[in-house]
Image (cartoon, rainbow, N blue to C red):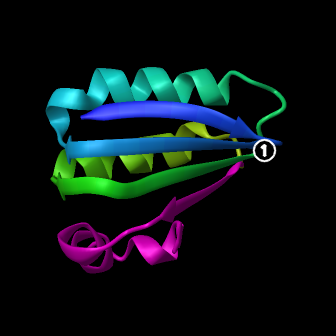
C-alpha cells in the first residue's frame, strides 16, 4: 500500500492505494501522525478510492486514528466495492462520515 498526504486549507487529504492490511500499519500511522501533529489541520479525509482490499486490522487502524484525532472530523471518501461493504458491515457510518 502507498499512503500520501496533501493539505487543502485546514484539511489533510490522505490517499491510500493497494491493500490496506496489518502489514502497512507503520506507514499508515506515520502518515496520519504527520497530519495530527499539525495544529492547522482540523479535519482528515481518508481517500480509499484506490484501495482494493482491507482487513480487520485496517478497521482497527481507522478506529485508533479516530481515538488519536483529538476531536478532528474524519471522513472516509471514495469507498466502493468490497471496501464499502466491509465498512457497512462494521457499521463505520456511525463513527465516520462516509462518502
The region drawn magenta spans: 72-99
Query: Compared to 72, does 98 lie above or below?
Result: below
Where the N terminus falls, by quadrant?
A: top left
Judge from the rendering whether residue 28 lies leftward or rightward of residue 31; answer left or right.
left
On the image, the x and y values in percent for residue 66 come to: 53, 48
Between 60 and 10, the one lying in front of the other is 10
Tell me the residue at 51%/67% (across/down): 95
Judge from the rendering whether residue 5 lies leftward or rightward of residue 90; answer left or right.
right
On the image, the x and y values in percent for residue 67 come to: 54, 44
Instruction: Count how many numbered circles sit on residues in the image.
Output: 1
Tell me the residue at 34%/23% (across/down): 27
Judge from the rendering whether residue 11 lies leftward or rightward of residue 40; answer left or right.
left
Between 6 and 24, the one lying in front of the other is 6
Q: State the residue position of label 1.
A: 42
Tell me the residue at 55%/24% (across/down): 33
Judge from the rendering whether residue 79 lies leftward or rightward of residue 54; answer left or right.
right
Amino acid at each position: 500500500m502507498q499512503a500520501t498526504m496533501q493539505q487543502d486549507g485546514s484539511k489533510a487529504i490522505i490517499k491510500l492505494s493497494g491493500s490496506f492490511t496489518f502489514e502497512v500499519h507503520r506507514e499508515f500511522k506515520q502518515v496520519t501522525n504527520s497530519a495530527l501533529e499539525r495544529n492547522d489541520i482540523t479535519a482528515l479525509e481518508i481517500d480509499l478510492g484506490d484501495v482494493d482490499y482491507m482487513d480487520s486490522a485496517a478497521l482497527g487502524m481507522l478506529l485508533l486514528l479516530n481515538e488519536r484525532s483529538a476531536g478532528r472530523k474524519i471522513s472516509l471518501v471514495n469507498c466502493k466495492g468490497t471496501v464499502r461493504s466491509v465498512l457497512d458491515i462494521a457499521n463505520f457510518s456511525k463513527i465516520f462520515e462516509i462518502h
